[in-house]
Image: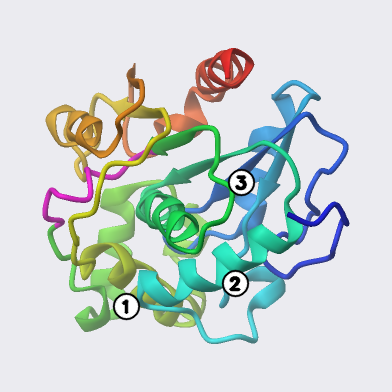
Amino acid sequence: MSTQNTKSPWLPFGSAQQADVRLLCLPHSGAGASAYRAWGADLPDWIGVCPVQPPGRETRRNEPPLSEVGPLVSALARNISAVIDGPYAVFGHSTGAICAFELCRELRRIGAPQPIHLFIAGRRAPQVEERSSRIGELTLDELAEVLRRHGGTPDWVVDDPGMLRMLHPLLTADFAISEAYAYTPEPPLDLPISVFAASDDPRASMAQLSAWEGQTTGEFTLHPLEGDHFAIFTHASVVHRAISAALRNA
């Protein structure tokens, strides 16, 4: 890996070269790198939070969003191998979770250094089939109702037809990444996996999250959280303590 702090569109806030270990954070559907900017601010200084920016949002809003996980992780894996030097971990929430998992497998395929830990939240294990929300087929009113049901989207966005119309292509692509994902069996990852399991997440039950254990030959830890699909944000301090402990032990 390169030791240069190369500027990358995938890492708009930098690669935190001064930190002992980097934490690459992949966002949920419709979100961008800024979702983790404030969220990660309370982690200890020796952990460098590196929010990942996929195409189609925020600083990359002029690029078309990707609707398949393969091209996304292929580009990201090569970028990481060129930009990130030293130990790093990967965190993914919801759609970002399946991207984080496939990123680790792609890094293994190309012979790049593996992360020291994979953190997952809000997404059933890859071998467990995901159900479709048919986002691409919905009217704006139906889309607003889906977003209200899922939670995590500000009311001012849900209540603004213009904003929904603008977000619709991005949400369609992001949901397709997760819901049209076809799992291909490969050997389990040789790294520890920690999963944050919310008690009232309609998209991922405790059993579906526990099934991530089959994707590692290393240590598996399930962290229960009270709350819904976005419990990692409402219980950020609990999540941060678990991440810090796991990376300190590594």
Between label 1 and label 2, give the one nearer the viewer.
2
Coordinates of residue 131 in the picture (x, y in percent): 12, 59
Residue at the location (23% across, 53% down)? Answer: 186
Determine crowd level at label 3: few under 14, some 14-19, many 20+ residues with C-alpha closer than 10 A: many
Report helix, strand or loop for mark 2: loop
Residue 73 located left or right of residue 9: left
Q: Is residue 116 above or below residue 126?
A: above
* Residue linked to disc 1: 140
- Viewer-closest of 243 and 219: 219
Name which residue type carries label 2: Arg
Number of the label disc, if any, that sits on residue 111: none
> Which residue appears at 18% of the width and 55% of the height?
185
Counting from the top left corner in percent of width and height, residue 232 is at: 46, 31
**Numbered tag placed on residue 57 in the rendering:** 2
Q: Left or right? Give the position of 35 relative to 170.
A: right
The disc, 1 or 3, on the residue closer to the chain's N-terminal end is 3
Give the alpha-carbon distance from disc 1 to disc 2, as whole Å.
19 Å
Indicate the position of residue 20 as horizontal and vertical percent values: 78, 29
Q: Secondary structure at mark 3?
A: strand
In the rendered image, the quadrant that contains the N terminus is bottom right
Which quadrant of the rendered structure holds the C terminus? top right
Q: Which residue is mark 3?
A: 24
- The magenta stretch spans which residues? 121-130
* Most frequent secondary structure within the magenta stretch: loop
| Callout 3 amino acid | Leu
Q: Is residue 54 visible?
A: no
Q: Per the image, is 235 magenta?
A: no
